Image: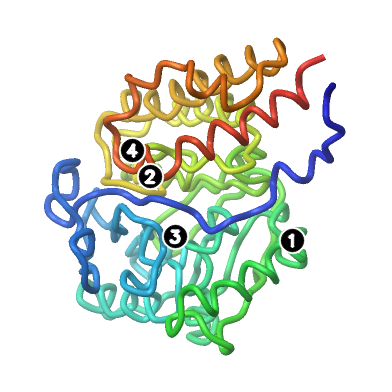
Amino acid sequence: MQRAIDRRQFFLRGTALLAGTGMGSAFSPDARAAGEAGGVPQMRALEAAPGCWYVQGVSALGSTENQNFISNAGFIVTSESVVVIDALGSPALAERLLAEIRKVTPKQVSHVVVTHYHADHIYGLQVFEQAGARILAHQGGREYLHSDTARLRLQASRTELAPWIDERTRLVPATQWIDGRHELVVGDTKLVLQPVGPAHTPEDLAVYVPKARLLYAGDLVFRSRIPFVGQADSRNWIASLDKLLEFEAEVIVPGHGPASTQARKDIQLTRDYLVYLRKTMGAAARDMTPFEEAYEATDWSRFEHLPLFGAANRMNAYNTYLLMEHETP
């Protein structure tokens, strides 16, 4: 029997998992991020294209030890000021990001663009708000921001991620909510803010820098590792990945993992994984095969070597199984 599942449940948030590997070369998938072996992870600004930078989180679950530094953030230095892409997973991390920016330029941060309202990308927003930056996000994030899910996630994080998340940490709304394609011009640089959800979240935004041919893809792209699927709309996510290729970017900075100069190849990994989840778990849902039986019978050999497969894959498969029950006629 099919379950009557409210579609909104497929967009409930959990703490985002798994980040990329490496703090060496800006494009090295083999570099190992500090923190995997324990201790506070390093943060270092990496230049992915002229004027376009990012910092790369560790490949781990959020924890007190890694300060919730499990995702990437970017920044673009324009002739006038700095535009930041995502704010990382704690106020302390946002302060560290500001320090990295100051090593590159004395210019102030004027804008922050939020690719989506997952905890590991937004808990640092208050630092930039206090510094006077304008915050831009897709209006789809409003519902989450005022939801019980967001409130309970923050409440849990104050315990699980203390002292980096505490009673002073708060959820920060956008200064400007956008709906549809938006061009942001700052100094000599144009940024194209393109809605690409609902996919990983309802409010997914990609940020394209035309003069650098660089795309900040948010969590639509996870490089060299298993994506965190959660309750995402995986059908639309696959379609959104195809849309990203239309930008013809030469460099992609993913939400997790090192930057890539092989956009099609790295987008394909995320796409193939989502397609495989939907194919295998969809067949099980249609045949009414119990999840545990279906999971054990599935051949995961193509993906099981990827980082954090053990931490994420079963949860991804189960959530996809529930989604496909809902989609199956």
Residue indicated by mark 3: 85
Query: What is the C-alpha distance between the residues marked 4 and 1?
Result: 29 Å
Quadrant of the image occupied by residue 34: bottom left
Kind of residue indicated by mark 2 = Pro
**At label 4, which amino acid type do we have?**
Arg
Residue 142 image label: 1
Task: Look at the numbered discs 3 and 2 and tell me whether their residues touch, using CB distance below 8 Å.
Answer: no
Between 35 and 137, the one lying in front of the other is 35
Q: Position of residue 175 (x, y in %)?
A: 66, 71
The residue pinned by badge 2 equals 254
Question: For the point 38% across and 74% down, which residue is it?
Answer: 64
Q: How far apart are the two marked residues, 3 and 2, measured between alpha carbons?
A: 11 Å
Q: Given contact means CB atoms under 8 Å apart, are the residues at marks 4 and 3 in contact?
A: no
Which corner quadrant holds the C terminus?
A: top right
**In terms of sequence position, does the residue under pointer 3 or pointer 2 come before the other?**
3
| Figure check: 302 above or below 80 | above
Could you say whether the residue bearing mark 1 is in a helix, strand or loop? helix
Work out whether mark 4 precedes mark 3 in sequence or the reverse, and give the earlier one: 3
CB contact under 8 Å: marks 2 and 4: no
Instruction: Name the front one of labels 4 and 3.
Output: 4
**If you read the primary sequence from the N terminus, does the residue marked by circle 2 or circle 4 appear first?**
4
Please give left or right for residue 135 compared with residue 40 in the image.
right
